[in-house]
Image (spheres, grey):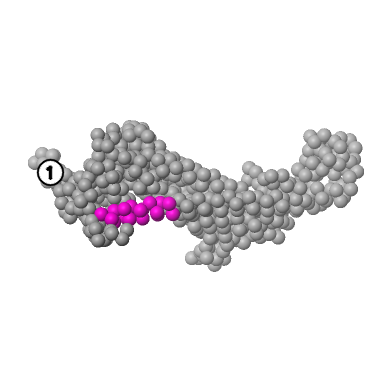
Amino acid sequence: MNIKDSIFENEGREFPGATYSEVVLAPAYEHAKQTLLEPMLAVHKAHLIMLVEQGLLEENGASQILAGISALDKEALLNSTYDGQYEDLFFLVESKIMNVAGEIGGSLHLARSRNDMGVAIYRMVLRDKILLATRALLSFQETLLRVIENYKETIVLGHTHTQQAQPMTFSHYLLGMYDVVDRDLKRLKAAYDTCNVSPLGAAALTTTGFPIDRKTVAELLGFPKIIKSAYDSIGGADYLGEIATAIQLTFINLGRFSQDLLLWSSQEFSAIRVADPYVQKSSIMPQKRNPVSLEHIRALSSSGIGNAQTVLQMLHNTPYGDINDTEDDLQPYLWKGLHLIDQVFRLAKVVVGTLEVNEALLKRRAQESFATITELADTLFRKANIPFRTSHSIASQVVKIALARGLNATHVTSVLVDEAAKTVVGFPLNLSDGIIRTAMDPEHFVKIRSLPGGPAPEEMQRAIVEREAGLHHHVSLLHTEVNRLKVCMEKLDQLTSQWGKTDEDTSGL
């Protein structure tokens, strides 16, 4: 037996081959029946309505087709497995519609292709999943604002290059993270707008010779616009890359945040304490409180980055046109990435919302740290009337002397400052101890930094009010869009429900 006959003996000589079915068609069918069935039926209805409105299909024929659509046993489809009788879910559904509608059922596919239909379905699925991810981000922001409100006067040390830098508040850090998430939302919104346009009417890639109305179908399915170029409708894949990039950056940002929280929850830092519901114990070490929820947030974020990167890699160097690389094998990575955003940010919300901050310890560290030395340099400039670079040198000398003597920042006095000044400029500055104590006080440091974006409590309160207004606006926009799409789907059912009714049924309308 030659090699071909040997393979055909196991694979079969007709489509689909056993291995092709196992590796490609069966997994694609599983994804399709779970995710693509409902939008597929919505596309069927919208296209059917348009064909009738354009006079391309009689209403009686449309009623028969609709009867076929309505007769579909969705539960049976969801429970079915791929048997190779039909190439994919589309052909299976078409066959079942025609079993009820008869030959006229085949006219449902008039003036369209699986190409434009498939892209439309993918876009409908993705826009719903983007909205779900958006909801999770907004909910996380809502909790973050409450935490920011609680800790706007909690003094902590800010770090640059992982070293103590300047005093700030815990809320100052969190507000920065809030704004990062705001940009994540902005990128998702942009990706949503790019995705939420209709390719329908492009057919295979050149439109059709029938006088269809692309805008009507788009409106019925909740697409505000159509993709202008029929070729781009089919060949364009950058909408997938834009979503992937937005997902990737969102998880990169969350991963950096979770890494900080993990570090701060260590016993060496003892800055924060993760609540008991999100901590696991060691199987052997009784003293352990492992903040594993933060580890999972970080790990799942990395997984989300991987899913997004897979999408970008699959798009790389593919031809600009209809190609399987952008379809069944790729789409699930985007679905999983967007689903992960929903899951991980819901977890981050409850973990961050229940954190405890070791305020007393963090304040004491700030008081003892030389992180306020910038303000000492500023004070010497203000009070001693010397150039800033000179005051900076004196403040630096103060730190050197104190460290050499085993002193911390609370031990800095006017005598020590004068000693440092003599070394740098040759004479004492003769400032009072009160002035020096104020300059070295981390609360004073924070309080006077009240410029827009600063950590001062009054500026933080202004920022919270501003962010709350923005958050409410974004939540309102989300609800409006979700409701708009819901109304579109309901309208589809209302329009098609009139077909097939008798005159008596509709006389009261």
Q: Nearer the viewer, residue 58 or 356?
A: 58
- Residue in the picture at 45% in, 56% down: 343
Residue 267 location (% of width, % of height) = 61, 58
Q: What element carries label 1?
A: loop
Residue 1 location (% of width, % of height) = 8, 41
**Quarter of the figure that contains the C terminus:** bottom left
Residue at the extreme bottom: 286
Residue at the extreme left: 1
Q: Nearer the viewer, residue 216 or 241?
A: 216
Residue wearing tag 1: 13
The mark total stands at: 1
Find residue 384 and report its image quarter: top right
In the image, taking residue 1 as reference, residue 288 lies left or right, namely right
- Residue in the picture at 67% in, 45% down: 453
In the image, taking residue 176 as reference, residue 246 lies left or right, namely left
Residue 49 location (% of width, % of height) = 29, 48
Q: Is residue 144 above or below residue 376?
A: below
Find residue 324 and report its image quarter: top left
- Residue in the picture at 49% in, 57% down: 346
Residue 380 appears in the rendering = yes
Q: Which of 106 and 233 is in front in this view?
A: 106
- Secondary structure mostly taken by the magenta-highlighted segment of the chain: helix
* Magenta residues (range): 483-499
Q: What residue type is disc 1 on? A: Arg
In the image, taking residue 358 as reference, residue 425 lies left or right, namely right
In the image, taking residue 381 as reference, residue 363 lies left or right, namely left
Residue 115 appears in the rendering = no
Residue 380 location (% of width, % of height) = 83, 41
- Residue in the picture at 56% in, 53% down: 472
